[in-house]
Image: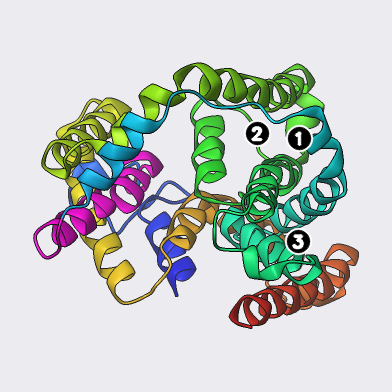
């Protein structure tokens, strides 16, 4: 339902034949709804509303974080013996994270839960999991970090974003006139290598940031929510305005902040909204091309070689997703 809502939102504006639809007579909707304010509203401002609601109904636990910030000195690098002893775990959970990241819409949370449950079952001391045991920390974080490489596979190869972040990345590609999908490799090979090297380089940058700035970053958690929440809201609204230099984008972000707040309250995922909004134009274009090739016949969606491969693949992905949810529930 969330994905269909995103596809419906993607129809707002000018269609492929130059006709206006669902613009309601306003010039702001002639070019459709931008992805950036939607993402800011759903994932940033909705969390601001959620945290503000919790802040006024529960006690604030900043003292706990403040004590942790005072006691934290610097990140400690693991010894070579620790790294070697956990190498099989790195390989297992890295493969799990890559595979789960390859499945569109899965994300790092599912990979973290799967790897955590797997290592807990394989461990000789499962009772230590949940007490700060290093295996219980290494496993989910390894899988979570490994999802980045897997997410880039459908994003760059097929033009299908694996999560909300790659959906924003694809939106940036479209803004700069870059094609999404296989044409990106053929027409912009240098750019692809830049993406690959950036993803690899970020891992080393994070180590440096964590080692040198850990004692400063942890103090952010000790800030009072009365300071942190308004600051996040201002930065998010500023980003929405900067995406188009129009106050209209701020209004869109606020509207989708309310949508995200309600979706979270009633357990509806809002990441598919971004995926549908991002892929809507591509899906519509491909649909029209297929119908023109088949003279409005629907058999083309069942008889073409790509369709014959895609439908079983879709069935397999849905089955794996169901198994993942069942595994997480167990």
Q: Cα distance, mark 3 to mark 1?
A: 21 Å
Relative to 78, 91 lies left or right: right
* As drawn, 141 above or below 194: below
For image coordinates 44% across by 51% down, the residue present is 15
For image coordinates 18% across by 61% down, the residue present is 54
> Disc 2 designates what residue?
179
Along the line of sight, the residue nearer the viewer: 256 or 47: 47
User: Which range is magenta?
Assistant: 33-59
Along the line of sight, the residue nearer the viewer: 227 or 120: 120
* Quadrant the C terminus occupies: bottom right
Camera sees residue 314? yes
Along the line of sight, the residue nearer the viewer: 279 or 67: 67
Relative to 36, 129 lies left or right: right
* As drawn, 113 above or below 231: below
- The rendered magenta stretch, by its main secondary structure, is classed as helix
Asked which quadrant contains residue 146, the reply is top right
> Disc 3 designates what residue?
293
* As drawn, 129 above or below 277: below
Whether residues under marks 3 and 1 lie with C-beta atoms below 8 angstroms apart, the answer is: no
Label 3: how many Cα within 10 Å (few below 14, some 14–19, many 20+)? few
Whether residues under marks 2 and 1 lie with C-beta atoms below 8 angstroms apart, the answer is: yes
Task: Mark 3 vs mark 1: give the one in front.
Answer: 1
> Disc 1 designates what residue?
183
Relative to 144, 244 lies left or right: left
For image coordinates 66% across by 38% down, the residue present is 180
Q: Give the secondary structure at mark 1.
A: helix
For image coordinates 66% across by 59% down, the residue present is 111
């Amino acid at each position: 339902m969330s994905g269909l809502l995103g596809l419906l939102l993607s129809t707002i504006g000018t269609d492929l034949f130059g006709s206006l639809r669902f613009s309601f007579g306003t010039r702001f909707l002639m070019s459709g709804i931008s992805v950036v304010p939607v993402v800011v509203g759903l994932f940033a401002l909705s969390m601001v509303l959620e945290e503000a609601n919790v802040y006024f109904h529960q006690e604030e636990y900043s003292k706990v974080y403040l004590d942790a910030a005072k006691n934290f000195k610097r990140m400690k690098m693991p010894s070579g013996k620790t790294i070697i002893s956990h190498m099989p775990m790195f390989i297992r959970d890295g493969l799990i994270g890559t595979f789960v990241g390859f499945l569109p819409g899965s994300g790092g949370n599912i990979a973290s839960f799967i790897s955590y449950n797997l290592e807990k079952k394989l461990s000789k001391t499962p009772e230590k999991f949940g007490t700060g045991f290093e295996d219980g920390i290494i496993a989910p974080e390894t899988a979570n970090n490994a999802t980045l490489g897997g997410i880039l596979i459908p994003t760059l190869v097929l033009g299908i974003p694996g999560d909300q972040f790659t959906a924003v990345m694809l939106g940036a590609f479209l803004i700069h006139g870059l094609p999404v999908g296989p044409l990106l490799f053929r027409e912009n090979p240098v750019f692809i290598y830049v993406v690959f090297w950036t993803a690899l380089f970020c891992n080393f940058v994070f180590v440096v940031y964590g080692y040198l700035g850990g004692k400063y970053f942890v103090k952010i958690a000790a800030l009072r929510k009365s300071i942190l929440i308004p600051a996040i809201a201002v930065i998010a609204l500023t980003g929405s305005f900067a995406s188009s230099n129009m106050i209209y984008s701020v209004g869109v972000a606020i509207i989708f902040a309310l949508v995200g707040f309600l979706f979270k309250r009633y357990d509806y995922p809002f990441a598919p909204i971004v995926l549908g909004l991002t892929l809507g134009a591509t899906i519509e274009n491909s649909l029209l091309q297929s119908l023109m090739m088949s003279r409005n016949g629907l058999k083309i969606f069942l008889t073409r070689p790509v369709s014959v491969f895609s439908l079983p693949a879709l069935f397999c992905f849905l089955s794996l997703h169901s198994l993942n949810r069942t595994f997480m529930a167990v």
